[in-house]
């Protein structure tokens, strides 16, 4: 449970970073949101105030997908006075007036019940500021061991919309990644843009879950087919293929390659194919891919879904979290 709480706290921090939180008061103060507690169905959010003696915040959520369990003002009578209003469904309105300026002080706790990553809004009526933030309600994958190395990246990848489960609350962390899955993940990260143009692959049928992704990835040079005009969407990819596709995606997005490792520190570097050398050198040099153990890259080994979640988090998640 401790590792999962840490994971969900990191996810909340990420959603706040992406939403440009903390929100600033006109007088220079801030309000920040932290994950205080979690159960299998609920999350408790804490609202902290710094460098402000009085103001008001409004927290709104979708009552069709989340339920307010409780809202509690946390200032004591010695610290100041508060006004809490939860009479309007989907809204928690809270105002405070402290007797002295607050310094990183918990003023409000809200407990909600729900499932999955949901969007809520935090607004500051006195300044007119408003931000959206993601509230990560616990979603348990029954096949993700909380004590494994991949727990945090799997849940981060899921909550940030980078990867989905396989159904029935399963993630299949040790299952191999197929070519169709890899294309779909990258397509989703790119925002699932509209796809036009011809489908170059005879074995990628129309209106499959991966069709647009594969055609898009082919158009941008992220994936290539085989000489006979096929793509082989259900074929498993290797770790060096995963690295190569990621590099092509990175460059297609207009990003710089950055550091390239010479791979000489790995005893199986000679197993990296010539066509995959740049991809592996880029992935290792930029901390996207690590060895499977000390001194070994295993470039020809199958890339698993857990490994893909980890490299996506390494590549896309800010280092500040």
Image (spheres, rainbow, N blue to C red):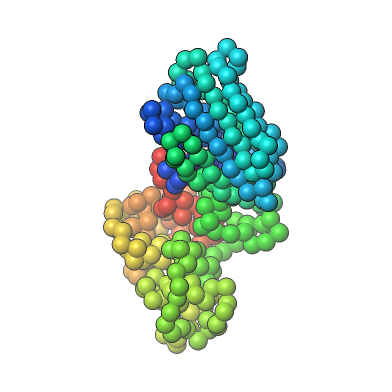
| Percent of width and height locating residue 168 | 71, 59
Q: How many marks?
A: 0
Q: Residue at x 51, y 57 (%)?
A: 162
Q: Residue at x 49, y 52 (%)?
A: 310
User: Residue most toward the top?
Assistant: 78
| Percent of width and height locating residue 111 | 66, 36
| Percent of width and height locating residue 135 | 57, 44
Q: Residue at x 44, y 39 (%)?
A: 128
| Percent of width and height locating residue 73 | 62, 26
- In terms of image quadrants, where is residue 69? top right
Residue 54 lies, with reference to residue 240, above or below; the image says above
- In terms of image quadrants, where is residue 19? top left
Residue 139 appears in the figure: no
Of 73 and 134, nearer the camera is: 73
**In the rendered view of the protein, which quadrant contains the C terminus?**
top left
Q: Residue at x 61, y 37 (%)?
A: 92
Of 301 and 205, nearer the camera is: 205
Of 280 and 116, nearer the camera is: 116
Residue 238 lies, with reference to residue 197, above or below; the image says above
**In the rendered view of the protein, which quadrant contains the N terminus?**
top right
Residue 121 appears in the figure: yes
């Amino acid at each position: 449970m401790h590792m999962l709480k840490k994971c969900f706290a990191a996810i909340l921090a990420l959603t706040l970073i992406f939403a440009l939180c903390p929100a600033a008061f006109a007088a220079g103060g801030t309000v920040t949101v932290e994950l205080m507690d979690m159960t299998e169905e609920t999350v408790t959010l804490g609202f902290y105030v710094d460098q402000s003696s009085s103001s008001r915040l409004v927290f709104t959520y979708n009552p069709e997908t989340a339920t307010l369990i409780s809202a509690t003002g946390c200032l004591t009578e010695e610290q100041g006075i508060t006004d809490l209003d939860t009479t309007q469904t989907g809204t928690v309105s809270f105002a405070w007036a402290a007797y002295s300026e607050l310094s990183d002080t918990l003023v409000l706790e809200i407990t909600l019940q729900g499932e999955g990553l949901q969007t809520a809004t935090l607004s500051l009526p006195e300044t007119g500021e408003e931000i959206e933030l993601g509230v990560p309600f616990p979603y348990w994958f029954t096949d993700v061991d909380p004590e494994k190395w991949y727990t945090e990246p799997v849940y981060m990848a899921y909550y940030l919309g980078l990867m989905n489960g396989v159904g029935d609350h399963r993630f299949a962390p040790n299952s191999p990644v197929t070519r169709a899955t890899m294309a779909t993940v990258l397509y989703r990260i790119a925002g699932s843009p509209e796809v036009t143009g011809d489908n170059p692959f005879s074995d990628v049928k129309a209106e499959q879950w991966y069709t647009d992704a594969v055609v898009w990835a082919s158009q941008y040079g992220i994936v290539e087919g085989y000489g006979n005009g096929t793509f082989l969407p259900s074929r498993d990819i290797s770790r060096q293929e995963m690295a190569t596709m990621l590099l092509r995606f990175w460059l297609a997005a207009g990003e710089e390659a950055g550091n390239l490792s010479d791979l000489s520190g790995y005893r199986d570097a000679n197993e990296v194919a010539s066509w995959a050398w740049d991809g592996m050198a880029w992935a290792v040099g930029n901390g996207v891919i690590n060895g499977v153990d000390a001194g070994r890259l295993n470039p020809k080994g199958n890339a698993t879904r857990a490994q893909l979640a980890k490299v996506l988090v390494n590549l896309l998640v800010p280092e500040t979290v």
